[in-house]
Image (cartoon, rainbow, N blue to C red):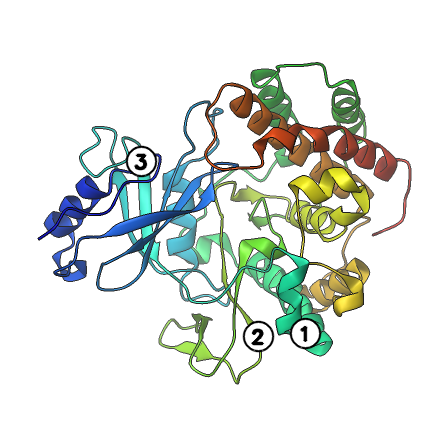
Amino acid sequence: MTRPTASPPGLDVHRLDQWLRRTHPELATERPVSATVIAGGRSNLTYRVEGAAVPLVLRRPPLGHVLSTAHDMAREHRVIAALEGTPVPVPRVVDLVDDRDGAAGTGTPFFLMEHVAGEVLAHPAQNVAYSPTELRALSLELAETLAELHRVDPADVGLADFGRPDGYLERQLRRWATQLDASRSRDVPALDALGALLREHVPAQQSAGIVHGDFRLDNAIVSRGVGARVGGAVDGTSDRTTDGAPRVAAILDWEMATLGDPTVDLGMLGLYWDIGALGEAAAGVATSAVDLAAGYPAFDELVDAYEARRGRPVPELSWYRAFGAYKLGVILEGVHYRYRAGETVGDGFDVIGDLVGPLADEGLARLATTRRG
């Protein structure tokens, strides 16, 4: 048997291959595994693993500067495992591993899950493969999927102790202010001003449930074709299949999931849905496939679809959209910190910090209006 191909940053594929043969012989084959980076370090590192009996995906924390409470592998693994069998489509999990001794190839906790076939819509060029009708339907399904997540009773899926919903918004503001202080490499006065205004105008929490924390189009896998898996049945006994239309096959990136005010997910979805309006800084950092001219609906239509599926009114969203801008600004400032320290993997990190100011300005503008979307 030959040695696996060269290892990508953050993963020793030879050790991973040997660990897989010891602990999951049912997944081992005559070929050694190989791995490539799918997502390179703006949040958790994600690798596509080939050579096992089924294609796999491995998730581990980013290299270098890791903020407190962020990138928690156990939490992400737990929520994905809990949601299997619900109307929320998620990948099937394989294992959660404490690999701080490096025996499995990472030197950090990581988890392994099955790969879900499909694509992530992240760039406008990908829209040509879909009709305007398909993109509209897919968008509304994304909003309905978020509503299904918020309809799940945490106690029914073993997540009753997954977080503390009471005081969630106040804790979130404290947490992200702390994260910003831990990532300071320059002055960001507009972002500081946005955080202060958010703290002054915290809305009353109207409901509680499972919060994804980073819900957006490019955190979903889209699959097309008869037989494509698009999530477990409600009773967990079978999988739904598509009829050839594109469907939401899996929701990814649960690293910030918790229990709290679900409306923050709508605010974050709205921020990303309209992020192209932030101009060139957004185009270089947070590319989005969303293009109304291609068939995507306006965000207000997503809110209506969400509201109809969830079965309860959506509160005024200006504060939540401003909070989404603040949160993303803090996250990108942390990435900018890691980039300056030489601790990022991949290209494009040199312009990450350019979006922080426009995000702060967007949040301040949202707080100055009372319109829903």
Mark 3 lies on residue: 109
Residue 224 coordinates in the image, percent (x, y): 52, 76
Q: Residue at x 46, y 25 (%)?
A: 343
For the residue carrying disc 2, how many other residues have a C-alpha within 10 Å: few (<14), some (14-19), or many (20+)?
many
Mark 2 lies on residue: 246
| Mark closer to the chain start, 3 or 2 | 3
Query: Would residue 176 be visible to someone looking at this image?
Result: yes
- Circle 1: residue type: Ala
Is residue 336 placed above or below 272 in the rendered structure? above
In the picture, measured across the screen, residue 141 lies left or right of residue 339, that is right
Residue 201 coordinates in the image, percent (x, y): 81, 31
Tell me if label 1 and label 2 are in contact, CB under 8 Å: yes
Q: Identify which residue, 280 or 336, lies in the foreground.
A: 280
Q: Residue at x 59, y 54 (%)?
A: 218
Mark 1 lies on residue: 137
For the residue carrying disc 1, how many other residues have a C-alpha within 10 Å: few (<14), some (14-19), or many (20+)?
some
Distance of label 1 from label 3 (alpha carbons) = 38 Å
- Circle 3: residue type: Pro
